[in-house]
Amino acid sequence: MADRADLVVIGAGTIGGWASVFAAEDGVGRVVVLERGLAGMGASSRAAGVVRAQGGTPETVALGRWSIDFYERQAATYGTDSGFRELGYLILAVTEDDERAGHERVAMQQGAGLTDVRWLTADEAAALVGTLAPAGHRGGSYRDGDGHIDPPRNVRAYSLAMQAAHVELRERTAGIRPRCALQSGQRAVRIQRPAARGRLDADRDRSRCDQRRHRARVVHQLRDRPDLRRRLRLKAPGAAFPARFMPRFRRPALSGTK
């Protein structure tokens, strides 16, 4: 007999862990996280932990600002935190093209509300960073409020937040395989686990189902189009293809930005 959940998250890394917490806080219902190993034992506990609002598009600027605000509110919200520290972040320009693109990026970021980002000349950058020589670069963009988190502490933080939100974490679930199905006219995700553990169904509409179907359609169309495969530099019909062929799904609007 299949077990049931309102939302199944595969992977207990930083994204999966915090996503499950947000979903539970939003009242999704029963949230289950499946992890093939142990929570945070992959890149999440070994990453550099960089958090910056100096994004390349207005959307990534908004996401960076939201992320910094989230990390700064963690202690008050969850009684723990990911160890975020504002250390400043400098993005150097090496070539003339880098410098031109950097100035355009700063103008875009300031227009998106990131008013404290600024451009430093080569001498200003060298004066700010004691180990940086004034030669070999053309300065760069800088923001004091960017910084990084402590990756192991972040794993601890979202693990505690998952427990507080009553998210069910199931570790060592190697062999899980998501399958898309339609039930009663609604899209669903069916998680096939090892036979001894049965099946876990989730009735939430998931964009991954749509992405898998879209990819299958594109691969099928490419199978009979060797000329198109050559233009896309694909060695085989099932090879990876440029991201522009993937559908773009609407994401919830970011809130809480400064």
Image: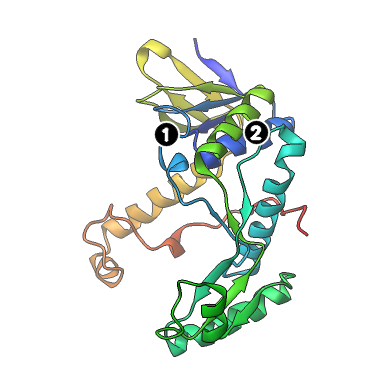
Does the image show residue 243? yes
Looking at the figure, which quarter contains the C terminus?
bottom right
Measure the alpha-carbon separation of dots 1 and 2. 18 Å
Q: Amino acid at mark 1?
A: Met
Q: Measuring 34% from the left and 54% from the top, which residue is drawn there?
A: 219
Q: Amino acid at mark 2?
A: Val
Q: Position of residue 6 (x, y in %)?
A: 63, 26
> Dot 1 lies on which element?
loop
Left or right of residue 40, residue 203 in this image? right
Q: Are marks 1 and 2 in contact (CB under 8 Å)?
A: no
Q: In the rendering, which numbered label is found on residue 21?
A: 2
Q: In the rendering, which numbered label is found on residue 130?
A: none
Relative height, residue 250 to residue 97 (above, below): above
| Label located before the other in sequence (1 or 2) | 2
Which residue is label 1 attached to?
41
Q: Nearer the viewer, residue 228 or 33?
A: 33
Left or right of residue 18, residue 113 in this image? right
Q: Measuring 74% from the left and 30% from the top, which residue is drawn there?
A: 27
Q: Residue furthest left?
A: 235
Q: Position of residue 162 (x, y in %)?
A: 62, 28
Q: Position of residue 115 (x, y in %)?
A: 74, 73
Relative height, residue 45 to residue 144 (above, below): above
